């Protein structure tokens, strides 16, 4: 019995290139500044953190949380992704420009503040919303949730902007200057 | 009335739609609204000349602010100028601006905006409402004079006008507040019905006068008006003949019935007004640019109007209204004539113009008529105004009135002289000069001129109409005798001193014009120059600013921190020691868990000071932050703790990003011993003070907190929240939240622009600069 001819699909110096789609973040980075462990961990943690941030946003009215905390958790998820995958890793999940996110957040909040005015109530007044969903039962929330949503979007935008300017921006400066990160 | 003002602004906003279909259309559309305004005001003339039309809209009721308006005789006279002449000049603009003119779109919208705010200004019956519109006129005039801002001359002229008028405007605001507080009301009609006396009132009046003087280009603030002649001619005609510069005169006219008996009111007005009339008239005799001749003429006439309105007296007030209308009706067409000449010949220099009386006979006749009104020739409105003005001060015996009358006579001689100079300069044949080539101006450039000139002529012939308009305003003054009470504006008052004065003014003016060469030589000799004064003041301010900035902004972070800490120590420490009481029930700790956390924070704080590497220091600061977050947890504030932990983490990340570009150690060599000791001492004292203040303030609360009780009670029902912190953030204090995220918005934009602005990003989606922008930034 002889060993079958070993045809290695991956050259040896690229042995750590991810082959599974769920590990890929678009283009691969250079081998020397990657940590595979962090990347894999990030891939598992990232969606979890996002879900947790949404939970914080929704639950804010009843226990610790809210738009600010939720937004920060989501932002930290992106930070993790940036640290693991660099600008490329970030670009694979968010194609919205940070200023657009920040502006949308502010717009949502301000609109939430102004809508009561159109309905004849003072600025920023809130009302209770209640619906009965099949299977779930009665769900209620406050219209002030929309204000929180605006805050959430804005905070995410601010963190992404931070990554864009202080992270990727400085990265590129250093790259242009020929310095190693 | 508010609706009318707002309509101006709305139409101005929509005007670019009309401009897209041609500039001419835009100006004609814009002219409709002022014309409607004039008709509306004239339709109410019955009520206006009686009690007046009032309207009031609550602005900020809790502050007692309101937008109140009142249409009375004086306001109506101003509306004739503001809206009537506004409409005429907008029609003229349609002919003036060429179809490819880049200024036209902006000018049309701005002139209409200006007409709107000026309308608000003259209708305002509330001091603060008036102030708001007053400053809006300054801003619109800045934009109109500055135009596209690509010419240094326009920029400087616009800035000078803005600086001077806003300086006066601010002082006026202070005066308004003092006056309003003294009177107990800001409603102008109520203040005038029962004018306050004593106390701060004289100061208030002087401050208000400063505003009026700067706006109406009185001595020594006058140079901005001739400088602003760089604006397009229709703009000059409107702003500087009919409306904006009249605002100061209008303010004086508005307040005079209440305060003209006070020396602190009439003495400055008469002195400054006469001085302005003489200086402006004298300077007009030396100018060679037709527009500047008219500009100095306007300065002179504004001084004249100031004297008439400020002196106080029934006849003077009649003359004031007469001259106000006359000035608008002759100065605006004169400006428009200059614009037409400029259009037809390409120059405004009176040394180069020749023979225009033959090539443009219609315009020449109109120009002579308008200039004749300016010089005070019967039967034009200018003559009636001027003769009434002489009458007002001749009839009122005494040294003061004689002095004023003689001053006005000398001023009128100068007026007649520069009127002659204008006519001669614009239309006469000059010896040894060929006729200037001309291409005839269209009807849009000449019809508005004729409309104004004929208006001046007609109002002169039907003087009783003007008298009916001026009467209710002038009757606010108590006439001293029966003769004064019966006097009215009319073309013929019989032979007398006033008529003699008018004749002297005309004759003297013509004589002065004949001697123009000598006069011009003299007029250039002046040891004082207000323009130099303005330039030196501005340059001095800039030098002071550079000096102060250089001393304070030294570019050293330790220096800034030391300043901040020192201020905190110097202000907080004495206040705490003097005013605070040390709470008696201080315990070492509430819960045992606080002790290890506290120790950890203290240890980390000490270690930060000892750290030599930046990275270590940042991590240790992080430890402090987490420790404080832990204390929040112990004290039962999970919301705060959550936010603290998250923010701490994020700032650590941001720090680490930035640290990549900084040296790893703080300093290459240790700083000198003395500065170390100083820093340590300052930091220690600062820390102690802040800690002490925290303890003292915690004892400041004596009763139960009523605000938080309400929050606790209202959160479940009112906001539907079990979490009170969330209820406060998104409901009770939601406006704060919106404000705070606004701050975050600005901060993020600031960071991004600081880091990214100087670089040209090739990739998509980062949107920072362009190569040319980079070149700009890097020089």
Image: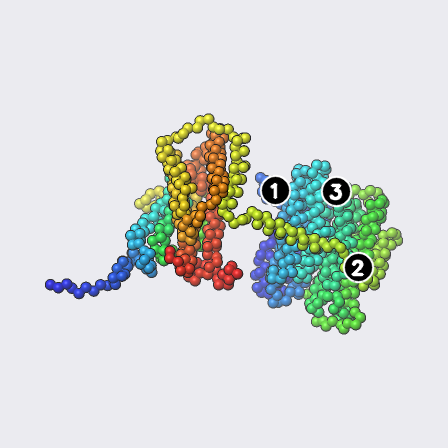
The image position of residue A69, as x and y in percent, is 40, 44
Q: Quadrant of residue A63?
A: top left
The image position of residue B462, as x and y in percent, is 79, 55
Q: Residue at x 61, y 43 (%)?
A: B66
The label on residue B65 is: 1
Viewer-side residue, B599 vs B772: B599
Nearest to N terminus: mark 2 or mark 3: 3
The label on residue B264 is: 3
Nearest to N terminus: mark 1 or mark 2: 1
Q: Residues within 10 Å of mark 3 (few under 14, many from 20)?
A: some
Question: From the viewer's perspective, is B738 left or right of B109?
Answer: left
Q: Residue at x 49, y 45 (%)?
A: B558
Please state the chain letter of the residue tagged with numbered disc 3 in the rendered image: B
Classify B676 as above or below B221: above
Disc 1, SS: strand
The image position of residue B630, as x and y in percent, is 37, 38
Please state the chain letter of the residue tagged with numbered disc 2 in the rendered image: B
The label on residue B522 is: 2
The label on residue B368 is: none
Question: Foreground mark, 2 or 3?
Answer: 2
Alpha carbon distance from label 1 to label 2: 53 Å
Question: From the viewer's perspective, is B731 left or right of A44?
Answer: right
Q: Residue at x 72, y 47 (%)?
A: B252
Q: Residue at x 76, y 56 (%)?
A: B526
Q: Residues within 10 Å of mark 1 (few under 14, many from 20)?
A: some
């Amino acid at each position: 019995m002889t060993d079958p001819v070993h045809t290695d699909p991956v050259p040896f110096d690229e042995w750590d290139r991810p082959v599974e789609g769920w590990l890929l973040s678009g283009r691969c980075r250079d081998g020397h500044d990657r940590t595979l462990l962090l990347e894999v961990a990030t891939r598992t943690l990232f969606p979890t953190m996002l879900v947790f941030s949404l939970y914080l946003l929704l639950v804010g009215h009843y226990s610790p949380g809210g738009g600010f905390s939720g937004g920060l958790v989501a932002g930290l998820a992106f930070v993790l992704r940036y640290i693991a995958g660099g600008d490329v890793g970030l670009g694979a999940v968010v194609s919205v420009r940070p200023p657009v996110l920040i502006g949308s957040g502010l717009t949502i909040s301000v609109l939430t503040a102004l809508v009561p005015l159109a309905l004849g109530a003072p600025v920023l007044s809130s009302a209770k919303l209640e619906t009965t969903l099949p299977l779930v039962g009665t769900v209620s929330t406050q219209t002030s949730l929309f204000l929180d949503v605006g805050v959430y979007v804005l905070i995410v935008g601010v963190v992404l902007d931070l990554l864009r300017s202080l992270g990727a921006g400085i990265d590129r400066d250093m790259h242009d200057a020929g310095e190693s990160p | 009335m508010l609706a009318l003002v707002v309509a101006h602004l709305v139409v101005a906003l929509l005007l670019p739609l009309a401009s897209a279909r041609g500039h001419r259309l835009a100006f004609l559309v814009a002219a409709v609204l002022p014309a409607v305004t004039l008709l509306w005001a004239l339709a109410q003339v019955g009520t206006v000349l009686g009690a007046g039309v009032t309207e009031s809209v609550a602005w900020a009721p809790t502050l007692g602010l309101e937008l109140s308006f009142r249409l009375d005789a004086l306001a109506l006279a101003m509306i004739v100028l503001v809206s009537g002449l506004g409409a005429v000049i907008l029609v003229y603009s349609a002919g003036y601006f060429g179809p490819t003119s880049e200024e036209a779109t902006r000018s049309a919208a701005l002139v209409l905006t200006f007409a709107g705010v000026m309308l608000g200004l003259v209708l305002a019956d509330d001091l603060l409402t008036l102030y708001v519109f007053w400053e809006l006129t300054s801003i619109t005039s800045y934009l109109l004079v500055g135009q596209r801002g690509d010419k240094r001359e326009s920029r400087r002229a616009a800035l000078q006008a803005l600086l001077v008028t806003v300086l006066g405007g601010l002082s006026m605001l202070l005066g308004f507040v003092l006056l309003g507080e003294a009177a107990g009301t800001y409603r102008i009609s109520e203040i005038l019905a029962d004018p306050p006396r004593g106390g701060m009132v004289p100061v208030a009046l002087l401050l208000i006068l400063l505003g009026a003087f700067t706006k109406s280009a009185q001595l020594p603030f006058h140079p901005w008006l001739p400088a602003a002649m760089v604006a397009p001619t229709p703009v000059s005609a409107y702003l500087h003949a009919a409306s904006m510069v009249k605002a100061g005169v209008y303010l004086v006219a508005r307040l005079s019935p209440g305060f003209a008996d006070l020396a602190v009111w009439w003495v400055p007005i008469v002195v400054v007004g006469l001085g302005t009339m003489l200086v402006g008239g004298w300077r007009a005799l030396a100018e060679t640019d037709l527009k500047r001749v008219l500009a100095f003429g306007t300065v002179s006439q504004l001084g004249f109007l100031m004297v008439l309105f400020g002196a106080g007296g029934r006849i003077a007030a009649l003359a004031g209204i007469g001259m106000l209308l006359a000035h608008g009706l002759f100065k605006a067409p004169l400006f428009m004539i200059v614009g037409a000449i400029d259009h037809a010949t390409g120059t405004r220099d009176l040394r180069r113009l020749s023979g225009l009386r033959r090539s443009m006979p219609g315009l020449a006749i109109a120009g002579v008529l308008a200039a004749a009104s300016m010089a005070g020739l019967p039967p034009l409105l200018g003559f009636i105004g001027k003769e009434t003005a002489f009458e007002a001060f001749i009839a009122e015996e005494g040294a003061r009135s004689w002095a004023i009358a003689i001053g006005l006579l000398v001023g009128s001689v100068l007026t007649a002289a520069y009127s002659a100079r204008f006519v001669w300069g614009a239309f006469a044949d000059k010896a040894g000069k060929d006729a200037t080539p001309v291409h005839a101006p269209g009807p849009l450039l000449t019809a508005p001129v004729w409309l104004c000139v004929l208006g001046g002529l007609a109002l002169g012939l039907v003087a009783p109409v003007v008298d009916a308009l001026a009467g209710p305003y002038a009757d606010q003054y108590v006439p001293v005798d029966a003769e004064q009470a019966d006097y009215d504006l009319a073309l013929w008052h019989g032979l007398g001193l006033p008529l003699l004065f008018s004749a002297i003014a005309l004759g003297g003016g013509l004589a002065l014009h004949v001697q123009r060469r000598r006069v011009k030589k003299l007029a250039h000799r002046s040891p004082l120059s207000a323009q130099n004064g303005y330039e030196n003041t501005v340059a001095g301010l800039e030098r002071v600013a550079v000096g102060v900035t250089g001393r304070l902004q030294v570019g050293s972070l330790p220096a800034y921190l030391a300043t901040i800490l020192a201020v905190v120590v110097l202000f907080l420490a004495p206040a705490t020691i003097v005013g605070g009481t040390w709470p008696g029930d201080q315990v070492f700790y509430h819960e045992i868990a606080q002790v290890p956390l506290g120790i950890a924070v203290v240890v980390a704080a000490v270690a930060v000071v000892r750290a030599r590497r930046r990275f270590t220091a940042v991590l240790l600061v992080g430890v402090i932050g987490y420790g404080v977050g832990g204390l929040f947890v112990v004290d039962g504030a999970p919301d705060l703790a959550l936010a603290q932990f998250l923010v701490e983490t994020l700032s650590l990340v941001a720090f680490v990003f930035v640290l990549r570009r900084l040296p790893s150690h703080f300093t290459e060599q240790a700083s000198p011993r003395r500065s170390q000791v100083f820093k340590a001492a300052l930091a220690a004292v600062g820390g102690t003070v802040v800690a002490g203040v925290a303890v003292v303030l915690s004892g400041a609360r004596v009763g139960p907190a009523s605000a938080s009780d309400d929050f606790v009670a209202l959160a479940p029902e009112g906001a539907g929240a079990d979490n009170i912190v969330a209820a406060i953030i998104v409901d009770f204090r939601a406006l704060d939240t919106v404000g705070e995220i606004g701050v975050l918005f600005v901060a993020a934009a600031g960071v991004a622009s600081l880091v990214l602005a100087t670089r040209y990003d090739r990739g998509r989606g980062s949107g920072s600069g362009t190569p040319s922008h980079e070149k700009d930034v890097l020089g």
